[in-house]
Amino acid sequence: MSSGSRSPSVSRAASIVPSPSVQRRSDTPQPPLPSPSSTLHRQRNDRPPHSNSPDEGGSCYTELHPGPQSYVEKLRAEEGSAGVDPLRGEDGNVYFSPVVETVSSFKPSRYQSPLMLKENKPLEVGILRRVKELLAEVDPKTAAKHITKADCTVARILEVTPEVQKMMGVSSGMELLTLPHGQQLRLDLLERRGRCDDMVTMFQTMAIMLAVDVLGCTGSTEERAGLLHKIIQIAAELKSTMGNMFGFAAVMRALELPQVSRLEQTWTALRQRHTEGAILYEKTLRPFMKSLNDGRESCPLSNTSFPHILPLLSLLEKSVAVGEGMEPWETVEVGVDVVMFHLGAARTIAQLGGIYRSNAESKLQGFQEQAEVLELFLTDFQMRLLWGSRGAEENQALRYAKFDQVLTALSNKLEPPVRPR
């Protein structure tokens, strides 16, 4: 299938090369996909004229061939709930010709926003001021809905057209991220919420932006405590109301960044002036987050719009998901059990893309998004805000390493570290 069948949004978001038709069976190991260069070379030079057979002189990469059902499709057929499916042909066969995306869907250098000029410097004061105003005006539930809308769109849970489904070779981004040709989606999700190599501290654009909101607050300690309370409320809404574990994990990481967690005066003010928020964070949200990572807790399926996939992304893309110290599944006590839990969860997640979509649509039904508020939670906007129009597309590790120093400087300015006597 050529890239011309993609929707305009995907055409803008990804640069792709054709891959051979992928025949996927749950019980058969699959060979690795060929590189784009070898694929194109064989397509142009090895295929005999007018060949209609994939076995004559090389594969016919430009034509669709019926293949066996995917694991999810097989289950649906067995349960008698296959129904009308954009991946199924009139003859009843399921056709697969997925494409391999090779470039990130995020294009910060080309991004245009009414909140910033065509070119901007990192952390411009005027943009930061407007971001703070918008975050102060929006209530936690509305903010959680905007975050969920952005998250589910990036992950291809929502707004996935039949053309995009055919491009992916599956019907949901939740299945795509478990497959070899879903690597770029995994990398994009790690950019939005994950970690990068050669880092001392775990970062993600959402967490950094929220941390900047707290650390860049030049007001009183009580004002910073109020911001922490607002962020805690947003995390609670993402967990309970929206069932968005992806967004919930990112907001929790913002609160757990060392540059934020070390602000003793600010956290003391939070406990004094927003006691209920402090208790909610310490007694409910933090233990729940730890249980999610340890594989001892899960969000009810009926309430989940976006499952907790960060451990899975970390396992599948370990080379770009290196964080501080060891992950929960790397310790001697729980290592194998936790790894097996998250790998087992991948199979379940791949099967339930339709349920996540239905849940997300139900929770966002009647939701009227505010354009400027939604901008705050788009990765392209966050990258431009944090690194500027020129720095947003620099080497990932370099970008985060520089910002580690910025956050540390901001944190130390607010509450200077105590020097040993």
Image (cartoon, helix red, strand yellow):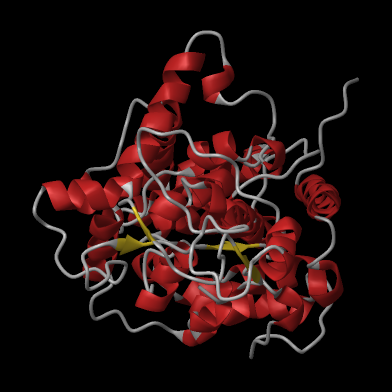
Q: Which residue shows up at 50% across the image and 66% down it? A: 154
Q: Which residue shows up at 69% across the image and 25% down it? A: 325
Query: Which residue appears farthest toward the top when viewing the image?
Result: 333
Q: Is residue 19 visible?
A: yes
Q: Which residue shows up at 44% across the image and 30% down it? A: 290
Query: Which residue appears farthest toward the right when viewing the image?
Result: 421
**Residue 298 sits in quarter:** top left
Point out the image quarter for the C terminus. Answer: top right
Return the x and y of residue 34 as percentages of the image width and height: 66, 50
Name above or below for residue 332 compared with residue 375: above
Return the x and y of residue 67 as percentages of the image width and height: 36, 55
Name above or below for residue 237 compared with residue 340: below
Name above or below for residue 410 compared with residue 43: above
**Residue 379 sits in quarter:** bottom right
Return the x and y of residue 93 as percentages of the image width and height: 27, 62
Number of numbered callouts drawn: 0
| Left or right, 280 with reference to 47 | left
Q: Is residue 150 visible?
A: no
Q: Of residues 327 and 161, which is closer to you in this image? A: 161
Q: Of residues 2 and 143, which is closer to you in this image? A: 2
Name above or below for residue 29 compared with residue 53: above
Return the x and y of residue 6 as percentages of the image width and height: 50, 79
| Left or right, 18 with reference to 22 | right
| Left or right, 254 with reference to 297 | right
**Residue 314 sits in quarter:** top right
Q: Of residues 395 and 41, which is closer to you in this image? A: 41
